[in-house]
Amino acid sequence: MSELKKRLSSILESPKHNTEEKLEKVCHLLDQEISYFNWTGFYFKNGDKEELILGPYVGAPTDHTIIPYGKGICGQVAVSNETFVVPDVNEESNYLSCSIDTKAEIVVPIFKEGKNIGQIDIDSHTVDPFTKEDRELLEWLCNEVSKVL
């Protein structure tokens, strides 16, 4: 994980790329390096609205480009301000299905000046794949991402 953190840091610190490009490169790196990350993307608060808008992502196209607060796992995290790990999406009543292949999801909020401004959302085609190390890596990453926003 420390090697992956170094690579993620170098993307975020790169003066050559704008924020959108950096976030897209982060998605690509996570997708390449962690085999059970099958959809990796960012959602951000949509202006003053109580909704999230899709940002850079890697994976199958999604219809969920706008997610109202409270709806689905991403919408819940926008309200709860806490990381949400769903080991099996079939057990979650408020799950918004993006793909029939998705079996698990982890969503980690991004805070800027104490406000929840977005999140990273990762889907997996494997039931219960996410480890404590994955959660720690993603929480670290979201803290680092907040510095470039």
Image: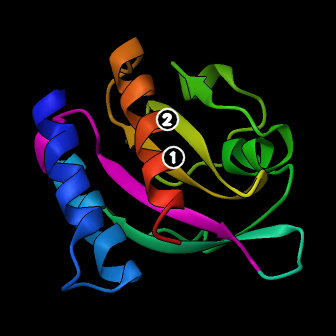
- In the image: residue 4, left or right of residue 18: left
Q: Is residue 102 visible?
A: no
Eyeballing the image, is 95 above or below 84? below
Label of residue 63 in the image: none
How does the figure colour the protein chain or chains? rainbow
Label of residue 139 in the image: 2
Eyeballing the image, is 93 above or below 148? above
Q: Position of residue 47 (x, y in %)?
A: 79, 82
Disc 1 from disc 2: Cα separation:
6 Å
- In the image: residue 13, left or right of residue 19: left
* Eye-nearest disc, 1 or 2: 1
Q: Position of residue 100 (x, y in %)?
A: 44, 45
Segment colored magenta: 32-46
Q: Position of residue 88 (x, y in %)?
A: 53, 20
Q: Quadrant of residue 117?
A: bottom right
- In the image: residue 107, left or right of residue 22: right
At a point 33% along the width and 34% down the height, the residue shown is 125
Amino acid under disc 1: Asn
Cβ–Cβ below 8 Å for labels 1 and 2? yes
